[in-house]
Image (cartoon, grey):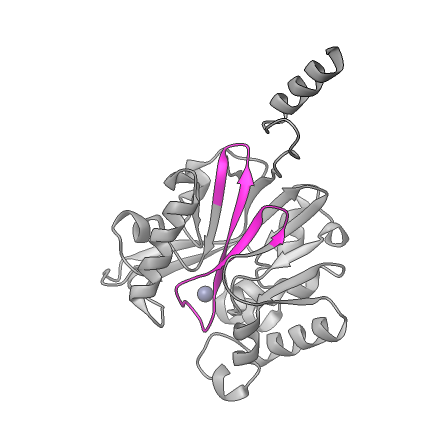
Amino acid sequence: MRVLLSGLVAAALAGSAPGSAPKPSYEVFAVRYATLVGFPKKYLVMGADSVPLDLAMMVWVVRGEGRTMLVDAGYYREEFKQSWNAKDFVSPDQAVARLGIRPADVTDVIISHLHWDHADGADLFPRAKVWVQRDEYAFYRDPANQRNSGVFPVDVAMFERIERDGRLALVPGDSVEVAPGVRVYIGGRHTKQSQYVSVPTRSGTVVLASDNMYLYENLDRHRPIAATWDSVSNLAAQDRMRRLASDPRLIVPGHDPAVFERFPAAGPGAAAIR
Ligand SMILES: [Zn+2]
């Protein structure tokens, strides 16, 4: 009886029913590696005016269950640094080092889409499995589809190297589990096949929207992102994020600097999403 009771207590403490395995849980951090100054809001929120915003350039850390995962990898190549001249730039691997994460510690990098500012840093993490939607990768490998797309040959070549290295994991569509409890979803067409991520945490389910929802304003005013192939599907994706997240405040937009005001600081340039 005593053994049974202590087993029940242990199961209760782990937050799960007796006999079932404890639910996976992760810590999530937003990490800022640069600021893009004076970016017009009309390129972010459909129907908005040209008011200039200082965009947070972010990657997201998901840590737990024996893994150290990143959602997106930022950029670091000289050509992008020079053409955008962002303020307070720190290479994304150095930005996550502030949380004590070394490049070789990163087990997985989930790329939300192949735009330069989210994908370019994927090869900074030499041991990581790199997750990309299969249709996104297939589409942008065709040079004809790279033109004016925000996806660059140098990054496509990098992903081809990662693939040859045996580290590229192509995601076959919607609602796919990439780690225990961590799932990716089709993102309402910011690019050919962008994706976003849900993560179980002690505060509930967090949704890392990346560019499928640029700013809090997209969600609050129910406005599609300005850069989408399909604004109806973008709004549907945002509506679904509301259903997936335990609370709308746990939906993290791709570039909103207010993330660092709404969540507690967790070191320089980092906020704990909880
Ligand atoms: Zn983008």
Report the residue at 59% width, 37% height from top: 267
Seen in the image, is 100 located left or right of residue 216?
Answer: right
Query: Viewer-proximal residue, 23 or 163?
Result: 23
Q: Taking the image as drawn, is residue 71 in sight?
A: yes
Report the residue at 65% width, 73% height from top: 159
Q: Is residue 200 magenta?
A: yes
Q: Is residue 253 above or below residue 246?
A: below
Seen in the image, is 80 located left or right of residue 240?
Answer: right
x then y, percent, for residue 128: 72, 59
* Residue bounds of the magenta highlight: 178-206
Query: Viewer-proximal residue, 240 or 153?
Result: 240
Q: Is residue 33 above or below residue 170?
A: above
x then y, percent, for residue 3: 75, 15
x then y, percent, for residue 192: 45, 73
Quarter of the image where ligand 1 sits: bottom left
Q: Taking the image as drawn, is residue 44 in sight?
A: no
Q: Within the image, what quadrant is residue 164 found in? A: bottom right
Seen in the image, is 224 located left or right of residue 85?
Answer: left
Count of numbered circles in the view: 0
